Amino acid sequence: MTHVTSMLETYPKDLGDIDQQKLAACIAACFECAQTCTACADACLAEDMVAELTTCIRKNLDCADVCASTGSVLSRHTGDNAEVARAALEACRTACGSCGDECEQHASMHEHCRVCAEACRRCEQACADLLASLG
């Protein structure tokens, strides 16, 4: 059991009919992707050919910010926030898709980009799965 799952299970109010496994998986994927994208941007900055990686760095940092925000929004349950949660999930899925595509272009030369692309794809899928379960 993860801390994300523990926090969802110990929430004092009813979370409604949301799939808690998908919610927990998405929150975890968002925060993992945010960390991975931040680390990938930093690794790109350490590369000798940093000028060739500016688009990758920008997409890493954008994705990291969107993922962190989405994870935070999904972690809050007080009040009705369904429209914002859906919008955040859509934005996160889009950012992860864009960053994943960019990192895949550099994956054969930079291992950190391969790892980042994988994290982006996992998060993109977790967002899609949660969105689909919301109806």
Image (cartoon, rainbow, N blue to C red):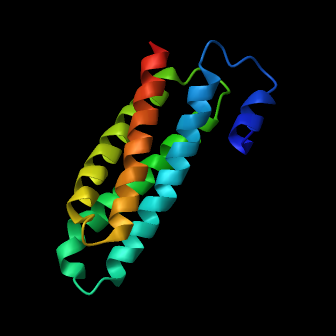
Relative placement, left or right, of 120 versus 30 is left
User: What is the x, y in percent for residue 88?
Assistant: 43, 35
Residue plotted at (38% across, 68% down): 112
Residue located at (30% from left, 51% from top): 100
Residue 73 appears in view: no
Question: What residue is at 30 percent from the left and 82 percent from the top?
Answer: 47
Expressed as whole percent of the image width and height from the top left, the position of residue 48 reads 26, 87
Q: Quadrant of residue 131?
A: top left
Q: In x, y percent, where is residue 49?
A: 22, 83
Q: Quadrant of residue 24?
A: top right
Horizontal relation, residue 105 to residue 68: left or right = left
* Residue at the image point whose x is 33% and y is 64% from the top: 113
| Residue placed furthest toward the left | 52
Q: Position of residue 80 (x, y in %)?
A: 58, 20
Q: Is residue 65 above or below residue 76?
A: below
Pick the quarter of the image with the C terminus.
top left
